[in-house]
């Protein structure tokens, strides 16, 4: 063992030095005091350091080695603990993000979207909320089956993600209902985005297993943060416009009339 060899080498060195020091003292101090260094004295000068210095120094070096190893082990454990802690933080963040996401579309779920929306309107009084609803979605499920319905929702989610970007504020807030919030946008920009989303969904080509094309469209309602005092009021206003779009025939955008914007 390398550590044992080092301890023995160090202890032997200390013992040799101790014997040398003992002999030096014997030939200098004893005569000065009037004594005589004879054979027994020389023997004691060698045996005493040999039987005292060697085991004592070996024990001390052994304990020092154990202490260093213990410190190294503590340092390693501390590093492992720090790495484990970072891993737990990363895992917690990943789980928290998953909890905010809709498993089907990867958009924010209702709770995640409303929380993010609350933060957004608290930071900036300007913005537009769009609420989208897939038209005749029950008919799609009944006619083509739920797997096709899921595919339709994923396709609409992809349209929203593409339009708003990976870090945009988009969510699936109900079964077939989605929402988009445009930070810092006025109603004109909101209307343009809503029309872009409507056209993009209408252009989707989704086929059932039979090869039949699945008709997709969305109705969209918009509301401006500039005229709504709270999150609840903003969502309610967008919902009212959504129902208005549906009453007018679906596959269209409805905007607040008092904003003097064309629906």
Image (cartoon, helix red, strand yellow):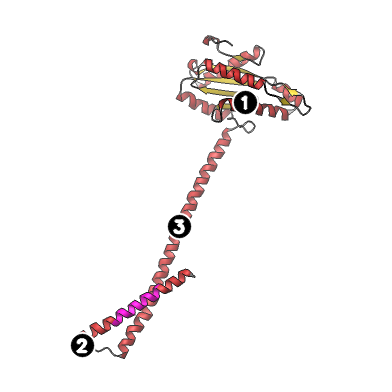
Nearer the observer: mark 1 or 2; the answer is 1
Query: Percent position (x, y) of residue 192?
Result: 56, 17
Magenta span covers which residues? 10-23
Image mark for residue 159:
1
Q: Quick one: label 3, few (<14), some, or many (20+) residues within 10 Å?
A: few
Instruction: Tell me: residue 217, above or below residue 22.
Output: above
How many labels, in total? 3
Nearer the observer: mark 3 or 2; the answer is 2
196 or 72, which lies in front?
A: 196
Q: Is residue 146 left or right of residue 164?
A: right
Residue 17 falls within the magenta-colored stretch: yes
260 or 163, which lies in front?
A: 163
Query: Percent position (x, y) of residue 206?
Result: 71, 26
Where disc 2 sits, the SS reads loop
Asked whether residue 237 is in view, the answer is: no
Where disc 3 sits, the SS reads helix
Q: Residue at x 37, y 75 (%)?
A: 13
Image mark for residue 34:
2
- Report, in whole angstroms, how far the alpha carbon at label 3 lies from the one at label 2: 57 Å
Residue receiving disc 3: 74
* Sequence-first tag of 3 and 1: 3
Residue 109 falls within the magenta-colored stretch: no
Q: Is residue 176 left or right of residue 117?
A: right
Instruction: Tell me: residue 127, above or below residue 6.
Output: above
Q: Quick one: label 1, few (<14), some, or many (20+) residues within 10 Å?
A: some
């Amino acid at each position: 063992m390398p550590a044992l060899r080092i301890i023995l080498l160090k202890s032997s060195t200390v013992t040799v030095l101790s014997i040398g020091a003992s002999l030096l003292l014997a030939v200098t101090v004893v005569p000065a005091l009037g004594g005589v260094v004879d054979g027994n004295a020389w023997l004691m000068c060698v045996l005493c350091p040999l039987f005292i210095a060697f085991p004592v120094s070996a024990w001390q070096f052994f304990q020092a080695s154990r202490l260093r190893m213990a410190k190294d082990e503590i340092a390693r454990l501390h590093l492992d603990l720090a790495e484990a802690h970072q891993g737990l933080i990363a895992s917690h963040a990943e789980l928290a993000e998953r909890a905010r996401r809709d498993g089907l579309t990867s958009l924010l779920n209702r709770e995640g979207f409303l929380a993010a929306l609350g933060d957004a309107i608290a930071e900036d009084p300007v913005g537009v909320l769009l609420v989208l609803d897939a038209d005749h979605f029950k008919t799609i499920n009944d006619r083509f089956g739920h797997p096709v319905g899921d595919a339709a929702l994923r396709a609409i989610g992809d349209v929203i993600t593409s339009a708003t970007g990976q870090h945009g504020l988009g969510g699936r807030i109900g079964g077939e209902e989605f929402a988009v919030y445009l930070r810092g946008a006025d109603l004109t920009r909101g209307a343009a985005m809503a029309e872009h989303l409507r056209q993009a969904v209408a252009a989707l080509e989704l086929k059932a297993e039979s090869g039949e094309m699945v008709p997709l469209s969305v109705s969209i309602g918009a509301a401006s943060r500039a005229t709504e005092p709270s999150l609840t009021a903003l969502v309610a206003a967008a919902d009212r416009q959504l129902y208005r779009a549906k009453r007018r025939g679906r596959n269209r955008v409805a905007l607040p009339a008092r904003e003097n914007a064309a629906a």
